[in-house]
Image: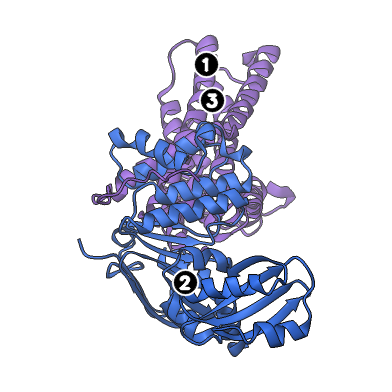
């Protein structure tokens, strides 16, 4: 062993950064980790593949097969597929964001430092949101590029609203996935459960509740996300009573979420899951 | 500046009916190295985790410099560097990036960051790997980076949970040297270990724990003299021989030498002598043994005194 060179003297760090500044540090390095671990680029490629398929389909069959005006085009392109991109972002960036800290033992590197757990949680959430927004921006840029190519630069204002609702949905989905990630200590389990919930379970429950039980599924996040596509429909769809729906003779209701209601559902999901997720992480033990 | 301190006040941790730590009261103060010993599952890591807020106490308090870790973690851990259970570092980051993250979290000024990171990485002999991804590192290399992370902020208190884990013999020796250096710089080091020779080499005091209960905390020399079965002022000397020795020579010739309390044959070519006397008497004993022409090839104080202490104390609680 050579002579150790540790300098004697006072401890350097008497003034720790604020918790908000520490959140920023966490977000910065988590984002760097996303870029380095190729997770970000894999999702970017998936987003580009979905965009390429849509571009090719529209080019092959002709835009008139799908839409007669710009609003119809954005409804077809954006309204039908962006929720999948948002869900994939939630799974990729939120699925194991917290559980991974336990399973991979990376949390042991962080938690022993003088920073609040909430700084870790929120910092990681901000990083996941930033990475997801980049993916969403690229996806939106390709949609707009196609829209301008076929219908000119006159982008309908409803697309702007839909874009904002998509970001709100992304915020809610990441809040939810972080909450689920806090529930588990196994990365694969939290990713799997999150994926099953968003890709199958919520849609299935929504179908059963609204179609069979005839109850408006206001408590399901995917129902709230309906505003992303609905706003691209003119006139805005409303809840309707239809005779003979689902093969029956009785009158059944087809529910359509309104904008205030949809926003309330998404905000509600985010607030509730963010609080519970944070509390879970605060209390969870590195055993 | 007041001397650094860590204190457990009625500190307990239970998992259901299992008591991992039971009513621990321990106050360590000043610049010194304290070895924390105990068998697997004794409660060593549990204690260190309670002091770093990785787990919550069922009862009691963990205080660092008088500040409750649970109630004010940021302030309590501001002057603490820790290494608990061989953490993993984000595999996609380099040591420079991982250590920069720690430095920024701890508020190290940008102007000092680069120099300090290079200094602590050099300390653990990882300079060549500073800009390589951690995912490619062996367990021992990661442990070296973890040690450098604990040292990064020049903490006045270091909590180390089996720091030699995963290290090769050279790495273990380097860790010992680092700890010895820190001791000279007004630092308090609280270190759990299974390596008794490591503890006896670098620690001034020792705390022993078993079944979640503190058995003893005192100066190393006091603990050894109280519990090793050797009376105060006595030393145990291991003697190595080049040829077999018979029982008669041991019982008659060696046992009767000046200062020898007892002598026993360990194997055909080794002896253990319990001896009472100062260094001059030891020198005399050595020359007497040489004069006996028994083929003496080694003569050194036994490293098993702490081991004997450990076994006596732990056995008593089984």
Is residue B14 among what the camera can see?
no
- Say the numbered circle drawn on residue B47: 2
Q: Which mark is residue A139?
A: 3
Which subunit holds the residue at mark 3? A
Query: Which chain, by letter, is purple?
Result: A
Labelled pair 3, 1 in contact (Cβ < 8 Å): no
Could you tell me if residue A68 is visible in this image? Answer: yes
Where residue B77 sits in the image (x, y, percent)?
Answer: 34, 59
Q: Nearer the viewer, residue B109 or A136?
A: B109
Residue A147's tag is 1
Sort mark 3 into few (<14), some (14-19) or many (20+) by Cα contacts within 10 Å.
many
Q: Quadrant of residue B270?
A: bottom right
B64 over A214 or under it: above or below = below
Q: Which residue is nearer to you in this view: B160 or B173?
A: B173
In the picture, the quarter occupied by the N terminus of chain B is bottom left
Q: Residues within 10 Å of mark 2 (few under 14, many from 20)?
A: many
Depth check, front residue: A185 or A83 = A185
Q: Residues within 10 Å of mark 1 (few under 14, many from 20)?
A: many
**Do labels 1 and 2 touch, CB within 8 Å?**
no
Q: Colour of chain B?
A: blue
Residue B269, position as x, y percentages in the image: 76, 71
Name which residue lies at 46% across and 36% down.
Answer: B97
Protein chain holding label 2: B
The residue that appears at 55% across and 38% down in the rendered structure is A89
Q: In what quadrant of the picture does the C terminus of chain B appear? A: bottom right
Q: Which mark is residue A194?
A: none
Q: Give the x, y percent position of residue B50.
A: 44, 69
Of labels 3 and 1, earlier in sequence is 3
Task: Say which residue appears at 57% left-offset and 58% top-offset.
Answer: A215
């Amino acid at each position: 062993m050579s002579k150790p060179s540790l300098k004697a003297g006072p401890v350097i760090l008497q003034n720790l950064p604020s918790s908000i500044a520490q959140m920023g540090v966490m977000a910065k390095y988590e984002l760097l980790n996303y870029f380095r671990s190729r997770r970000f680029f894999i999702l970017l490629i998936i987003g580009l593949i979905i965009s390429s398929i849509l571009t090719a389909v529209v080019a092959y069959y002709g835009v008139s097969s799908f839409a007669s005006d710009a609003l119809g085009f954005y409804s077809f392109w954006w309204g039908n597929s962006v929720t999948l991109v948002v869900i994939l972002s939630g799974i990729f960036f939120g699925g194991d964001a917290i559980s991974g800290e336990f399973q991979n033992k990376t949390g042991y590197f962080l938690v022993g430092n003088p920073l609040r757990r909430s700084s870790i949680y929120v910092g990681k959430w901000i990083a996941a949101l930033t990475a997801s927004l980049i993916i969403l921006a690229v996806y939106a840029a390709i949609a707009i590029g196609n829209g301008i190519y076929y219908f000119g630069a006159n982008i309908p204002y409803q697309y702007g609203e839909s874009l904002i609702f998509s970001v709100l949905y992304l915020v809610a989905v990441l809040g939810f996935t972080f909450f689920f990630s806090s529930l588990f200590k196994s990365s694969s389990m939290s990713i799997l459960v999150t994926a099953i919930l968003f890709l199958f379970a919520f849609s299935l429950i929504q179908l059963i509740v609204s179609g069979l039980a005839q109850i408006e599924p206001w408590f399901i996040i995917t129902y709230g996300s309906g505003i992303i596509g609905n706003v691209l429909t003119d006139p805005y769809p409303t809840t309707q009573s239809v005779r003979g729906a689902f093969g029956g003779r009785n009158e059944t209701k087809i529910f359509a979420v309104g904008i205030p209601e949809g926003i309330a559902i998404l905000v509600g999901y985010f607030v509730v899951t963010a609080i519970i997720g944070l509390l879970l992480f605060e209390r969870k033990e590195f055993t | 500046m007041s001397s650094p301190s860590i204190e457990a006040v009625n500190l307990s941790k239970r998992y259901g009916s299992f008591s991992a730590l039971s009513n621990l009261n321990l106050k360590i103060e000043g610049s010194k190295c304290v070895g924390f010993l105990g068998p697997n599952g004794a409660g060593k890591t549990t204690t260190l985790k309670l002091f770093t807020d990785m787990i919550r106490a069922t009862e009691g308090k963990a205080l660092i410099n008088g500040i409750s870790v649970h109630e004010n973690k940021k302030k309590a851990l501001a002057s603490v560097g820790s290494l608990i259970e061989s953490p993993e570092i984000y595999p996609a980051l380099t040591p420079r990036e991982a250590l920069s993250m720690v430095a920024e979290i701890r508020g190290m000024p940008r102007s000092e960051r680069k120099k300090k990171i290079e200094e602590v990485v050099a300390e653990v002999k990882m300079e060549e790997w500073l800009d390589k991804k951690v995912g490619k590192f062996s367990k021992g290399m990661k442990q070296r980076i973890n040690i450098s992370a604990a040292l990064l902020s020049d903490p006045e208190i270091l909590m180390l949970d089996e720091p030699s884990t995963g290290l090769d013999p050279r790495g273990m020796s380097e860790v010992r040297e680092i700890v010895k250096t820190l001791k000279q710089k007004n630092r308090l080091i609280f270190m759990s270990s299974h390596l008794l020779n490591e503890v006896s080499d670098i620690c001034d005091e020792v705390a022993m724990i078993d079944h979640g209960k503190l058995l003893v905390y005192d100066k190393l020399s006091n603990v050894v003299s109280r519990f090793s079965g050797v009376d105060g002022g006595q030393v145990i000397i291991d003697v190595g021989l080049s040829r077999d020795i018979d029982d008669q020579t041991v019982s008659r010739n060696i046992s009767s030498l000046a200062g020898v309390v007892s002598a026993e044959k360990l194997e055909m070519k080794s002896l253990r002598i319990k001896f009472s006397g100062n260094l001059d008497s030891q020198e005399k004993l050595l020359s007497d043994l040489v004069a006996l022409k028994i083929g003496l090839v080694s003569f050194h104080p036994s490293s098993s005194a702490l081991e004997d202490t450990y076994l006596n104390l732990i056995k008593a609680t089984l």
